[in-house]
Amino acid sequence: MEITATILLFIGVIFGFMAFTHLSMNMKVPKMTWMIHLIMVILGVVALIIYALATENVEKHYNILVIFAIALIPGLLILFGKRGTGTKKALAMVYGLIGLFGFFWLLTYVLP
């Protein structure tokens, strides 16, 4: 389940980077790009929650879930906030950096 969550989140990272690239070039982000990002991240986090509930060593996954919950705040502000382009870019950078940190932290548990 941990590998499944990692694969789903990796796909979410790829589509999130594509969305950020569009946003940084002042282009409209295609709806399918951010929808695939959203779906893959949600499925990956749900897989992590299920794995955290099913395993004996749950504390390592709670750390990652807290990081993704923190990344959710600027992500929701980007999605639902009525902000200017500069603010959306800054929020997207914060969101992406926090999300990548959480993903790389997950990789430290999966790879060894």
Image (cartoon, rainbow, N blue to C red):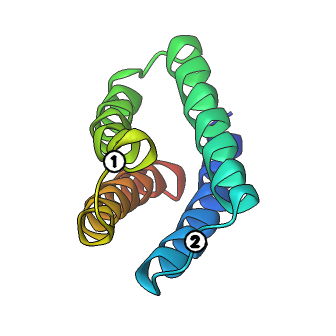
Q: Residues within 10 Å of mark 2 (few under 14, many from 20)?
A: few
Quadrant location, the N terminus: top right
Amino acid type, residue under disc 2 in the picture: Lys
Residue 32, x across and y down, in percent: 75, 57
Residue farthest to the bottom, as pictured: 25
The kind of secondary structure element at disc 2 is loop
Residue farthest to the right, as pictured: 32
Earlier residue among tags 1 and 2 = 2
Residue at image point 30% right, 68% down: 93
Residue at image point 34% right, 47% down: 82
Quadrant hosting residue 97? bottom left
Q: How far apart are labels 1 and 2 at the CA level?
A: 15 Å
Amino acid type, residue under disc 1 in the picture: Lys
Residue 106, x across and y down, in percent: 44, 49
Quadrant hosting residue 72? top left
Where does label 2 land, which residue? Answer: 28
101 displayed left or right of 28: left
Q: Nearer the viewer, residue 93 or 107?
A: 93
13 displayed left or right of 30: left
63 displayed left or right of 104: left
Residue at image point 33% right, 43% down: 77
The kind of secondary structure element at disc 1 is loop
Where does label 1 land, which residue? Answer: 82
